[in-house]
Amino acid sequence: MTSVLTRPELTPDRTPTRRHYVMCPPTYFAVEYAINPWMQPGIAVDRELALAQWDTLRRTYLELGHEVTVVDPVPGLPDMVYAANAATIVDGRVYGARFRYAERVPEAAAFRGSLPGTYCEPSFVNEGEGDLLVAGDVVLAGTGFRTDPRAHAEAARVLRRPVIGLELVDPRYYHLDTALAVLGDHDVAYLPEAFSPRSRGILAGRYPEALVASPVDAAVLGLNAVSDGAHVVLPAAATGLAAALRDRGYTPVGVDLSELLKGGGGPKCCTLEVRA
Ligand code: ARG
């Protein structure tokens, strides 16, 4: 099928902007508890492989010209590798996380000292950029499994951006960043089936040209992607999504994070963006 976007004269020019990311190595990574359907407690995890895969992701960002701050991992906090959950940072304001499950609660404090900006302690459960995705001038905010909807209003106040609430309905896509990827200020990719009918309507109204992902690509966490406006770092297994991104003028960069998928995370989960 030839989409209109494959005609070169109509393919938009994508311009990357330099980003600053926070990451945390999977030094103590394990799957010891299950708080999402991807996690099978006790499953063997190859930590050395996890570290190597994570390091490839880190080096990919450096090669793309981005800055990466690495936070020290803490023993006993196996999910710290999913740094995206630690906060949401906009214009130097840090809206801290408050984790839903006891196992992850101490992570908020473990990251806090390494996050540049003015820290704001949250009153409501929110899992940082897992559920709060900055898209241009607005914040798309997930709820349904982790983030308390009351945190959406709090995030709007702290981050001084309009927040658009979206309800997730499929437990496999428990964080917004597993069901939707921000590609550019006004461009997203998402899996409609992961959202309530009302939220689907909001997304269709706001992003009529959005890239609609297939369930097959979503099932390898293909939407857990990181865009700099031109390059989109995503799970290598999401081949259909990579092709669709290329058609839209993006450069997909596939990475293999198979070990970290055992915890229910991909590239975006491992990446917290600092917006100074
Ligand atoms: N095991 C972690 C959890 O369930 C994975 C977090 C993935 N992070 C993300 N941004 N989606 O909380």
Image: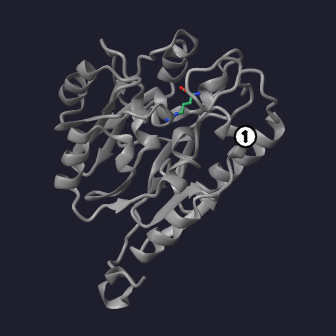
* Identity of the residue furthest to the top in this view: 102
**Residue 84 shows up from this direction:** yes
Question: Label 1: how many residues lie within 10 Å, few (<14), some (14-19) or many (20+)?
Answer: many
Return the residue at label 1.
259
What is the secondary structure assignment of the residue under circle 1? helix
**Residue 273 shows up from this direction:** no
Q: Residue at x 71, y 17 (%)?
A: 75
Residue 42 in the image: x percent, y percent?
Answer: 77, 21
Q: Residue at x 75, y 40 (%)?
A: 50
Please name whichever residue, 214 or 84, is drawn nearer the observer in this view of the structure: 214
**Ligand 1 position by quadrant:** top right
Q: Is residue 264 left or right of residue 105?
A: right
Residue 218 in the image: x percent, y percent?
Answer: 50, 50
Tell me the amino acid under the disc marked 1.
Glu
Q: Residue at x 67, y 23 (%)?
A: 78
Residue 34 in the image: x percent, y percent?
Answer: 62, 20
Q: Quadrant of the C terminus?
A: top left
Residue 242 in the image: x percent, y percent?
Answer: 53, 66
Mark 1 residue CB less than 8 A from any atom of ligand 1: no
